[in-house]
Image (spheres, helix red, strand yellow):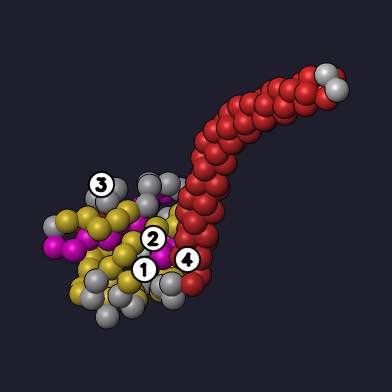
Amino acid sequence: MHRLPIIAVGAASLALGLAACGGSSSSSSSGTSSAPASSASSSPATSTSAASSASSAAPASGGSTLTQAADPSGALKFTKSSLAAKAGKVTVNFDNASMVPHNFTIEQGSSVVGATPTFSGGSKTLTVTLKPGTYTFFCSVDGHRAAGMQGTLTVQ
Ligand SMILES: [Cu+2]
């Protein structure tokens, strides 16, 4: 008769102990797991959205892709004196097979819209977002523009 209450109390205290232990461990585990979970879910989310927007932007935006090249024999001229593109994202693949350093610079009025680095013996890609208008492209290496390395880019 006396043991049943003792056992019941013992079981109750054991249950309390378990409950307290379980409660503290679950609250601490939920507290610690929620922080990494939110940071873990937010960082992949931002990286995937950034990656998907970056990867989908070029092909999916329907932007124009232009090709231009410096004279491969080293003459101070571009192979095309005029270019045309649609307004929006414009990608220029600029090839300079010669050993003369060149760049491809786009200007509207007197402000530079975008430019590749100056380089030789390779190719560079320049991506700019352009509004409709008339732009000038040229090579900004000293004397090259004056020698004829310039042309007109028409954006519609
Ligand atoms: Cu040049």
- Identify the residue under disc 3: 142
Residue marked by disc 2 = 127
The residue under the point 59% across, 36% down is 30
Range of magenta residues: 90-109
First of labels 3, 1 by sequence position: 1
Residue 89's tag is: 1
Rendered residue at 23%/66% (across/down): 136
Q: Amino acid at mark 1?
A: Lys
Up-down: is 2 above or below 153?
above
Q: Are marks 2 and 1 in contact (CB under 8 Å)?
A: yes
The type of residue carrying mark 4 is Ala
| Percent x, y of residue 123 | 49, 55
Residues at badges 4 and 1 in contact (C-beta under 8 Å)?
A: yes
Task: Name the residue furthest left.
Answer: 110
Nearer the observer, 28 or 78: 28
Mark 3 or mark 2, which is nearer the start of the sequence? 2
**In this rendering, the label closer to the viewer, 3 or 1:** 1
Task: Indicate the amino acid at tag 2.
Answer: Thr
Label 4 beta carbon within 8 A of ligand 1: no
Q: Is residue 93 magenta?
A: yes
